[in-house]
Amino acid sequence: MKIKSIQTTLFQSPLKTPFKTALRTVSNLEDIVVIIECENGLIGYGEGSPTAVITGETLGTMKEAIEYISNFLIGLNIDANFEDIINIIHSKLLHNTTAKSALEIAIYDLISKYRDKPLFSFLGGDKIAFTTDITISLDEINKMVSDSLSAVSLGYDTLKIKLGNNAKKDIERIIEIHRALPNDTILRLDANQGWNVEQTIEIMQKVENLGIFPQLLEQPIKADDISGLKEIKGKIKTPILADESVFNLSQAKYILETKSADFLNIKLAKCGGISVALKIAKLAKEYNVKCMMGCMLEGPIGIVASLHLVSAMSDIINMVDLDAVALLANQPKNCSVIFDESHITLSKNSGLGITY
């Protein structure tokens, strides 16, 4: 099954409402879709969303990185040289993790199609039904409360609340959202590196003293401040989820060894694709640390690829934050995967179960 051609195209869609965090505001999704065709006629699809403020990648750099790596892949046999191909994707260019992930997804799509298995089965999983949270964008308090109530009315029982641009107002946001929601609603807080250590401890201790205990607090401080994460972890009751602090296996290992966070957030775009994500999940399992599967603002191909990985590692990846498709104004076509707000059901078709 030799690679005949590798092409890229642009996937675009407006969002239902602007996506706002402490780091950026986005109104339209723009992703790179990778299309790999083999000599036997099989076609594989991959996808990656440039997130310059997190991964350092833009549409332009992703396209050039994919084209550069592709030069080393044309003519290789995916079935006979699968591990070599994965190694080439990661060794021929430093960084550029989202570009590598997009290529990897297409390769995994192809190998599982060739084996006539859904990707989750190829990876060793069997679970096909999942429930995701939904993100509540950073905004004025009354808007965030309204958005939270709307999400609950659509069936979401877990909300991820974006914070991080104003410490004092963030406390009010948490209190007012918690007060407005049903008691059984699960809250995940995400400050997107917007606080410092002192602010985080002060905010969370005030919130906890009011009897508000979120499921987790995601990446409250700068990504490189691992000692700060550990200090926070020791002074609040809410578990810490490391996100931007964990791009690769060595970073994950350091956080696990130093016990600097309670959970890890795995994203294909951060780590470079399915192969590294599997290694991080397996390492976390050794330390008995649960993981979240997260995403950037991605289209259906990227989200579905992440869910196949969750299926394979569902014993350790027990939290799903894969709501990006639900945020799109245009819902996916040519897709045998079912997206129904918080509920996503994978197809049992071979490969990803999705085309472009």
Image (tube, helix red, strand yellow):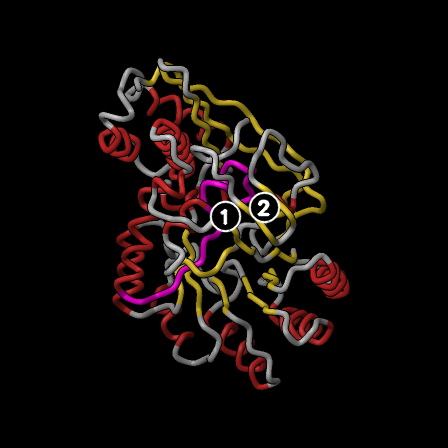
Residue drawn at 56 percent across, 55 percent down:
132
Q: Which residue is at the front of the view, 243 or 305?
A: 305
Residue drawn at 37 percent across, 42 percent down:
121
Residue drawn at 56 percent across, 39 percent down:
337
The quarter holding residue 83 reads: top left
Residue 51 in view in this figure: no
Q: Which residues are magenta?
A: 287-307
Q: Mark 1 sits on what residue? A: 295
Residue 125 placement (x, y as % from top left): 38, 48
Q: Are marks 1 and 2 in contact (CB under 8 Å)?
A: yes
Dot 2 lies on which element? helix
**Kind of residue at badge 1:** Cys
Left or right? Give the position of 33 relative to 119. Answer: right
Residue 1 placement (x, y as % from top left): 30, 19
Q: Which residue is at the front of the view, 325 or 118?
A: 118
Residue 156 placement (x, y as % from top left): 65, 60
In the rendered structure, find residue 82 and report the number of the disc placed on it.
none
**Kind of residue at badge 2:** Ala
- Decide: is 1 above or below 221: above
Q: Which residue is at the front of the view, 289 or 346?
A: 346
Q: Mark 2 sits on what residue? A: 324
Residue drawn at 50 percent across, 69 percent down:
216
Mark 1 to mark 2 CA distance (whole Å):
7 Å
Q: Which residue is at the front of the view, 142 or 107?
A: 107
Left or right? Give the position of 334 relative to 349. Answer: right
- Decide: is 83 above or below 54: above
The quadrant in which the C terminus is found is: top right
Q: For the residue carrying disc 2, how many other residues have a C-alpha within 10 Å: few (<14), some (14-19), or many (20+)?
A: many
Dot 1 lies on which element? loop
